[in-house]
Image (cartoon, rainbow, N blue to C red):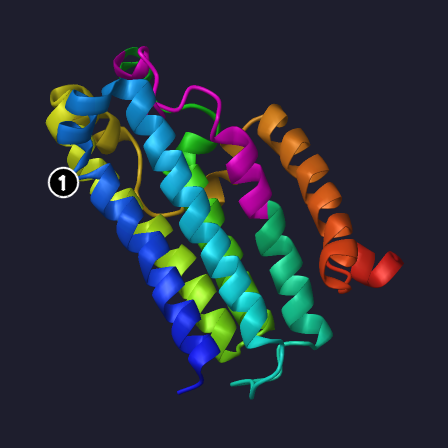
């Protein structure tokens, strides 16, 4: 196996593994020793370091390599553009009243019931990352993309499941009630209940990031692929 791909596998494993380890078995003892701010500083440093390593390893592999299928036709790009718009809406709405985020009001937010994108899923941020990973693998099904996108997809979806288990312990019946009213899985039919603000923020973010994609990767994405 090519050494650059081995390095990418190692970096991606470190990125995902350290997230899981720090978020779950080591979180309580480290918070007890370092405090909340100290722990978040360490967590952020490790996350940035391992992700930076993964990105550099990804670039070192290079864009070549056999593709499992042709992901560059107009139909895959059209589907990917719609999926990324949905991902942008979920991401934009995930910051408003999210009881999964560190917030002293988390219990009250969960008790208030679902709103906005939480009608679609209780893990909108995680699903936005998973959709991003799926789209990038569909359009560029190479070994390096499989490793990095796969790692991010696993981190998002397994991480969401593990987050539920952790919150059940920390918040008890409050989180159990939130789970009963929301879904781990996506319900696309409820996107209409997301509200205007996530849609406005999502569309703006989608347009900006797909435009930036041209300059970052030299590949037009989203609407810019057809109207650029």
Numbered circles on residues, count: 1
Q: Position of residue 47 (x, y in %)?
A: 40, 43
Residue, x 52% and y 55% (percent of image)?
Answer: 132
Left or right side of 118 for 78:
right
Whether the magenta-drawn stretch holds residue 90 is answered as: yes
Q: Which residue is mark 1?
A: 25
Q: Position of residue 139 (x, y in %)?
A: 60, 71
Whether the magenta-drawn stretch holds residue 175 is answered as: no
Left or right side of 68 for 204:
right
Question: Is residue 30 placed above or below 223 in the rendered structure?
Answer: above
Residue 184 image-quadrant placement: top left
Residue, x 21% and y 45% (percent of image)?
Answer: 21
- Pick the front one: 4 or 95: 4
Residue 127 seen anywhere in this rendered image of the structure: no
For label 1, the SS is loop
Residue 41 image-quadrant placement: top left
Q: Residues within 10 Å of mark 1 (few under 14, many from 20)?
A: few
Split into 4 quadrants, where in the image is the N terminus?
A: bottom left
Residue, x 56% and y 88% (percent of image)?
Answer: 66
Question: Is residue 67 placed above or below 168 in the rendered structure?
Answer: below
Question: Is residue 204 placed above or below 186 in the rendered structure?
Answer: above
Residue 89 seen anywhere in this rendered image of the structure: yes
**Magenta residues?**
86-107
Q: Position of residue 153 (x, y in %)?
A: 40, 57
């Amino acid at each position: 196996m090519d050494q650059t791909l081995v390095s990418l596998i190692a970096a991606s494993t470190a990125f995902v593994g350290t997230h899981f380890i720090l978020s779950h078995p080591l979180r309580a003892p480290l918070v007890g020793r370092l405090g909340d701010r100290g722990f978040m500083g360490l967590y952020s440093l490790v996350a940035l370091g391992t992700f930076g390593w993964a990105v550099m390893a990804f670039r070192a592999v290079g864009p070549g390599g056999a593709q499992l299928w042709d992901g560059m036709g107009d139909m895959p790009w059209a589907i990917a553009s719609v999926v990324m718009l949905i991902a942008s809406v979920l991401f934009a709405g995930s910051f408003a009243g999210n009881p999964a985020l560190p917030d002293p009001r988390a219990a009250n937010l969960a008790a208030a019931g679902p709103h906005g994108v939480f009608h679609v899923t209780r893990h909108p941020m995680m699903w936005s990352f998973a959709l991003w990973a799926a789209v990038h693998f569909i359009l560029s099904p190479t070994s390096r993309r499989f490793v990095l996108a796969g790692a991010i997809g696993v981190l998002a979806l397994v991480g969401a499941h593990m987050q539920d288990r952790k919150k059940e312990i920390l918040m008890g019946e409050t989180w159990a009630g939130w789970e009963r009213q929301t879904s781990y899985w996506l319900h696309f039919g409820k996107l209409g209940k997301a509200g205007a603000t996530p849609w406005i923020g999502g569309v703006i973010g989608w347009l900006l990031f797909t435009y930036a994609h041209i300059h970052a990767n030299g590949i037009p994405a989203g609407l810019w692929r057809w109207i650029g």
